[in-house]
Amino acid sequence: MESEAPECSKDGTERKRRKAKVRWERNEEDRMRKVIWKQGRKLCLLGVLAALSIFASGCFGGGKEKYTFRENGIDLLEAGDYEGAIQAFDQALKASDGMVGNFELDILKYRAEAECGTGDYEAAANTYAVLNQVDGERPEYLGRSCLLYVKAGAVDKALEQYQRAYAKDPAGETTQEALLAVGQGLTDAGRFDDAMGLYESALSGGMQNAELYNRMGLCQLDAGKISDALDYFEQGLSMADQEPEVRKKLVYNKAAAQEQNADFAGAFTTLESYVQEFGSTAEIEKEMTFLKTR
């Protein structure tokens, strides 16, 4: 019986919200356009393109065609043509007026989403790193790049992004999501002490919730420290009454830990309580039948 590990967060939901929220009114955008300032200076778009390995002549269009490229990119993104979408967004950037403003920031976010669609999570994380440079170091950018670096298997880069996000906004939702992602990445890499150090630092910083204890239990379970894992699962269960989905994982993982600890009767009893609370599945029934034989 394997413990129930958390799924990675999905990409794409942010685009739906952003698309509903951000529909550019062309005349208004031209009138209200804000140029991003960094350390008191206008940031040239040419530097952004260079950071993304987008080749440009240095002469930007600044015409209305940038809107057409943007809309084409969105259509291609929604159709699943991620490579075509990236090309369209790059064209939109090159058709801009050479400075970084709200339009360019929006394009970069769409571009990162298209890169996610191709499975190139590190490229998407690098695009968010560029957003950090041109739009000020925002916790949401740091957290997003952290999640993407974890998906890319670049755990050390993810850890660096998380630490910067934590310094900016330790209690933020994005920061907490980043913490769980990095901790899982470290666990998957067999770096159990590093993962536990990260989790314990979050606990001492005031982050106390059932999911955190669940992740700590999973980490200890993978490390072979079954007694410690059971303690963490119990602590999580003590505060999961209002979080049914987390509670469901904790009960299941507790049963898995009991089975690994050769406490077959305890595992059976825990699964019985699981069935009473959450219902049964073919997998649960099979596991309970097995436990009866032990």
Image: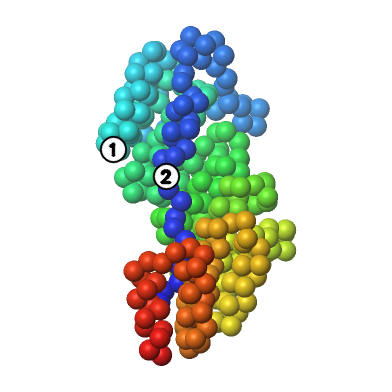
Which residue is located at x 65 percent, y 32 percent?
39
- Residue 194 appearing in the image: no
Which residue is located at x 37 percent, y 66 percent?
281
| Label 1 SS | loop
Q: Residues within 10 Å of mark 2 (few under 14, many from 20)?
A: few
Residue type at mark 2: give it.
Answer: Asp
Give the camera-side residue of 215 and 273.
273
The residue furthest front is 276
Residue 208, compared with residue 266, is above or below; it is above
Which residue is located at x 61 percent, y 31 percent?
38
| Label 2 SS | loop
Q: Is residue 85 left or right of residue 213?
A: left
Point out residue 115 in the picture as x, y percentages from the top left corner: 36, 42
Give the camera-side residue of 211 and 186.
211
Point out residue 270 in the picture as x, y percentages from the top left corner: 52, 76
Label disc, if present, on residue 11 of the rendered structure = 2
Which residue is located at x 55 percent, y 48 percent?
143
Residue type at mark 1: give it.
Answer: Gly
In what quadrant of the picture does the N terminus appear? bottom left
Q: Earlier in the sequence, mark 2 or mark 1?
A: 2
Figure quadrant of residue 210: bottom right
Q: Residues within 10 Å of mark 1 (few under 14, many from 20)?
A: some
Identify the residue position indicated by label 1 in the image. 80
Q: CA distance from mark 2 to mark 1?
A: 13 Å
